[in-house]
């Protein structure tokens, strides 16, 4: 780009996609996660996300209301990263601690683990520290 004219520049799809990803990461560092990002990060559905918000387990840092009335929820990166570290589903716990899903389910049915979502979400949600203690 000799004269600094953007119109004369050509970028490939891959370069543009990389640029968009980089900008998105920078924005997340500055502002946090949008609800769709949190859903992807925690691997939960939208209904579960709304239920966790209703239970005050996940609290948006900022709510942006657009002219058409649509709301966008913005969550603190620290809050979401801490939530992901402190809570996990059966599948995540099995991968993280290298134990079978069936053993985690058995502990739950025996009352050794408590579902912190209390049945409000489609999948069980456990405190990571409880699983560590039970696994010893």
Image: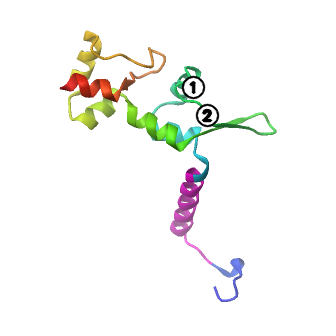
**Residue under label 1:** 53
Q: Are marks 2 and 1 in contact (CB under 8 Å)?
A: yes
**Residue under label 2:** 60
The residue under the point 61% across, 48% down is 31
- Compared across the picture, whether 125 is left or right of 80 comes to left
- Compared across the picture, whether 76 is left or right of 129 comes to right
Residue found at the far top of this picture: 110
Q: Which residues are magenta?
A: 10-29
Q: Determine which quarter of the picture holds residue 24.
A: bottom right
The residue under the point 35% across, 16% down is 114
The percent position of residue 45, horizontal first and vertical second, equals 50, 30
Residue 20 higher or lower than 72, as above or below = below
Residue 73 higher or lower than 100, as above or below = below
Q: Is residue 119 magenta?
A: no
The residue under the point 33% across, 29% down is 128
Residue 129 vs residue 28, the one in the foreground: 129
Residue 119 vs residue 129, the one in the foreground: 129
Residue found at the far bottom of this picture: 2
């Amino acid at each position: 780009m000799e004269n600094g004219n953007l119109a004369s520049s050509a970028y490939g799809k891959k370069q543009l996609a990389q640029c968009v990803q980089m900008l998105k990461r920078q924005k997340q560092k500055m502002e946090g996660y949008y609800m769709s990002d949190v859903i992807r990060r925690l691997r939960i559905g939208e209904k579960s996300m709304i239920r966790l918000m209703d239970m005050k387990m996940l609290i948006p840092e900022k709510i942006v209301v657009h002219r058409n009335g649509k709301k966008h929820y913005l969550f603190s990166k620290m809050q979401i990263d801490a939530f992901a570290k402190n809570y996990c589903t059966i599948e995540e716990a099995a991968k993280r601690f290298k134990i079978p899903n069936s053993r985690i389910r058995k502990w739950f049915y025996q009352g050794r683990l408590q579902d912190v979502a209390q049945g409000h979400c489609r999948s069980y949600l456990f405190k990571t520290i409880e699983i560590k203690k039970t696994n010893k």
